[in-house]
Image: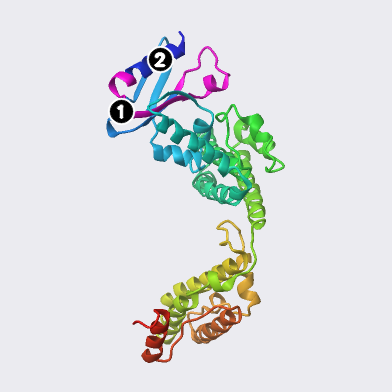
């Protein structure tokens, strides 16, 4: 069977029935890359131009070969091109079979321009951030692996480890500013040639894919995740910027002061529950904003220490959380009062303008000046 005869049949049908409802038809995968075997299917997709266009979707088998003519919206195609979804290769490496108009063809080609743009040095930081986001999806699988009982089968461990491995590998692609041109199982050579990767990546993959020992699989998944996070943190640090307080912390003190007052009120009322949540929230929030002011980035969710609070400590601010004592909240109250004063002084010294007024008259003058003489 000539699979392209199947393609022609589908395109002919589209031109007759869906001429105004389908913008693009293309194929991808092994036939597009010249690696097809006698059992390879022809991987199609189409981009609908109307709701009716979605009705053209069909899955079928001819002479033992399966086919899937499936729709991708323009919006999803853009997510693929911007590395928001992992199937970037579908857009980058496909071959067009049909375009409704020159405008549709041009719009599709702009998606390929977007892929090239995303791989440029200007977007490297964005891809590092996407690589970090991808790691969030790993932890559900790690939790299951580490909480599993001894009675679980090897199938359970391999299934969850597969989830860890595929998401970690996608994170590596993003970290390197690449996309995989082949599916998992066919892309090992490309994976192992990525410049940024753990030194023991090949060994971790070998254990995860081949071991029959539960503990070995779990350890390999844990270590692979930890090594990946270390690489991501190191790449993030390359993009730390210069300190800039006036623009990054404008309005911050005015907002956080209310939270610091909440700690003081909780302490005066001997409300430990409120004090606990407020103290933790305030210290973490102030530390995160100071980190942002100094580096231009927000703290990573995956740094397993409080190093992001170093700027907080260097400023001499009190450790509110350490002062949480259910039998005596007076030290916490005094610390919150000190923090309120010192934080304002610190920010003013860094050039941050703070809107503090003694009365409503001063506030009215401020509004009038800001609005060019009109209140």
Q: Nearer the viewer, residue 140 or 237?
A: 237
Quick one: which residue is furthest to the right in this view? 199
Q: Is residue 212 visible?
A: no
Q: Nearer the viewer, residue 77 or 146?
A: 77
Q: Is residue 21 magenta?
A: yes
- Coordinates of residue 46 in the picture (x, y in percent): 39, 28
- Coordinates of residue 136 in the picture (x, y in percent): 51, 49
The residue shown at (63%, 39%) is 216
Q: Quadrant of residue 44?
A: top left
Q: Nearer the viewer, residue 297 or 311?
A: 297
- Name the mark on residue 220: none
Name the residue carrying label 1. 20
| Quarter that holds the C terminus | bottom left
The residue shown at (45%, 72%) is 277
Q: Which residues are magenta?
A: 14-43
Placement of 52 over or under 334, stated as above or below: above
The residue shown at (35%, 16%) is 12
Placement of 96 over or under 150, stated as above or below: above
| Disc 2 packing (10 Å; few <14; some 14–19; many ≥20) | few
Q: Secondary structure at mark 2?
A: helix
Does label 2 or label 1 sit earlier along the sequence?
A: 2
Q: Is residue 310 magenta?
A: no
Q: Secondary structure at mark 1?
A: loop
Name the residue carrying label 2. 8
- Coordinates of residue 271 in the picture (x, y in percent): 41, 80
- Coordinates of residue 122 in the picture (x, y in percent): 61, 50
The residue shown at (60%, 74%) is 312
Q: Nearer the viewer, residue 87 or 123?
A: 123
Do residues under tags 2 and 1 come within 8 Å of each other at their CB atoms?
no
């Amino acid at each position: 069977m000539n699979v392209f005869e199947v393609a022609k049949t589908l395109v002919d049908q589209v031109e007759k029935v869906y001429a105004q409802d389908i913008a693009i038809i293309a194929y991808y995968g092994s036939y597009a890359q010249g690696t097809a075997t006698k059992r390879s299917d022809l991987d199609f997709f189409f981009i609908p131009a109307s709701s009716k266009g979605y009705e053209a979707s069909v899955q079928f088998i001819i002479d033992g070969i399966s086919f899937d003519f499936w729709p991708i919206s323009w919006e999803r195609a853009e997510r693929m091109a911007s590395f928001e979804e992992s199937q970037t290769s579908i857009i980058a490496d496909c071959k067009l079979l049909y375009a409704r108009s020159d405008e549709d063809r041009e719009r599709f080609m702009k998606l390929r321009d977007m892929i090239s743009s995303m791989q440029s040095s200007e977007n490297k930081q964005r891809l590092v951030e996407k690589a970090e986001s991808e790691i969030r999806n790993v932890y559900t699988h790690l939790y299951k692996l580490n909480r599993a009982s001894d009675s679980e089968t090897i199938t359970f461990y391999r299934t969850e480890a597969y989830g860890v491995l595929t998401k970690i590998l996608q994170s590596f692609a993003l970290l390197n500013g690449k996309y995989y041109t082949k599916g998992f199982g066919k892309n090992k050579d490309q994976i192992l040639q990525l410049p940024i990767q753990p030194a023991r990546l090949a060994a971790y993959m070998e254990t995860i894919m081949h071991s029959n020992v539960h503990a070995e699989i779990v350890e390999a998944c844990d270590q692979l995740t930890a090594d990946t996070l270390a690489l991501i943190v190191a790449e993030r640090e390359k993009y730390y910027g210069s300190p800039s307080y006036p623009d990054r912390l404008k309005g911050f003190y005015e907002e956080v002061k209310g939270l610091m007052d909440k700690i003081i009120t909780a302490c005066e009322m001997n409300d430990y529950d409120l004090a606990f949540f407020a103290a933790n929230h305030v210290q973490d929030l102030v530390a995160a904003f100071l980190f942002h002011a100094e580096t231009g980035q927000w703290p990573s969710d995956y740094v397993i220490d409080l190093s992001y609070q170093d700027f907080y400590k260097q400023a001499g601010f009190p450790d509110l959380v350490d002062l949480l004592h259910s039998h005596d909240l007076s030290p916490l109250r005094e610390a919150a009062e000190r923090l309120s004063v010192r934080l304002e002084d610190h920010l003013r010294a860094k050039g941050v303008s703070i809107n503090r007024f003694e009365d409503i008259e001063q506030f009215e003058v401020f509004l009038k000046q800001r609005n060019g003489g009109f209140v």
